[in-house]
Amino acid sequence: MKGKITEIFESIQGEGVYVGERQLFVRLSGCNLKCAFCDTDTSRFKEYEPQEVIDELKKFRGHAHSVSFTGGEPLAQKDFLGELMRLTRKAGWRNYLETNGTLFEEIRELSWLADFVAMDIKLPSSTGLKGYWDEHRQFLAACGPAEVFLKAIICDTTREEDIFESIKLIKELRSGAILVLQADSSTKDPKTVNMIIESFRMLCRRSGIAVCAIPQMHKIIGLK
């Protein structure tokens, strides 16, 4: 079995509730979506066997919070990812899955291998795509015992109705999960986006949702 890997590296987590933690990153190539704000190029890749990835990870010394499987969309290579996660568990690492939260059948098979799930809520007014609310519901229902938090990219086009739908989704399926509001890093009007984020943050708080606003710190400080 071989999988398509864009890069394997060590860095600091720059997004979500574990921002600042040292992690090992495995960036898998390919994605089932194409969001308007996406700036990740996964068209270049090298093919690895699962054990070859583990051998590369073992070259990094020191304590790491976890191994972050990111992309692209890692679950698009479900069988390869599953074997990788089994091997990282066996080697003593915890598994941190970054996902767009749409491939619910795939997470249903692999949820038992995930210690942390950082799931995007793909707001249609941000992505320029259709809504994936049903897929998100089925995905969250299939996450099992993993620690789950959610991220939503906020643009100057993001509509309040999408935030209300996100609140409904969280209350139905993961009432204790934290929602991270994250500014579109490519925006040309950060002041307006920050004002929008603050209004959405207050809306979530009034609705009883645990919420925070965290920018993409790795881009601010110049890390991968």
Image (cartoon, grey):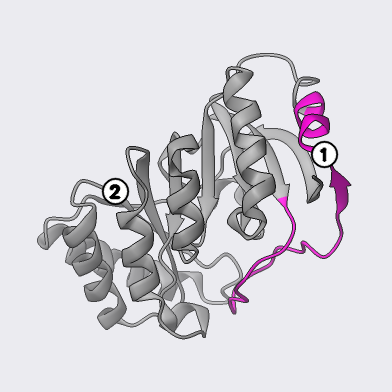
- Do the residues under discs 2 and 1 have CB atoms within 8 angstroms? no
- At a point 22% along the width and 50% down the height, the residue shown is 210
Q: In the image, is residue 194 above or below residue 111?
A: below
Nearest to viewer (mark 2 / mark 1): 1
Residue 156 visible in this rendered orientation of the protein: no
Q: Give how far apart the Cα atoms at labels 2 and 1 are.
A: 35 Å
In the foreground, 71 or 55? 55
Query: Which residue is nearer to you in this view: 92 or 192?
Result: 92
Amino acid type indicated by mark 2:
Ile
Q: Would residue 58 be found to the left or right of residue 35 on screen?
A: right
Measured as percent of width and height from the top left, residue 69 is found at 62, 43
Circle 2 residue? 178
Measured as percent of width and height from the top left, residue 2 is found at 82, 47
Magenta-span inclusion, residue 184 = no
Residue at the limit of the structure toward the top, as seen here:
62
Secondary structure type for disc 1? loop
Q: How many marks?
A: 2
Dominant secondary structure, magenta: loop
Above or below, comparing residue 56 to residue 181 in the picture: above
Is 68 displayed left or right of 29 in the figure? Answer: left
74 up-or-down from 223: above or below: below
Q: What residue appears at the point 22 percent right and 66 percent down from the top-left corner?
A: 167
How far across and how far down the image is residue 158, in percent?
39, 80
Location of mark 1 (residue): 49
Q: Amino acid at mark 1?
A: Glu
Tell me the quadrant of the picture where the N terminus can be found: top right
Q: First in sequence: mark 2 or mark 1?
A: 1
Which residues are the magenta region? 28-56
**Which quadrant of the view contains residue 205?**
bottom left
Q: Residue at x 71, y 63 (%)?
A: 40
Binning the other alpha carbons within 10 Å of mark 2 as few (below 14), some (14 to 19) or many (20 upward) gives: some
Q: Residues within 10 Å of mark 1 (few under 14, many from 20)?
A: some
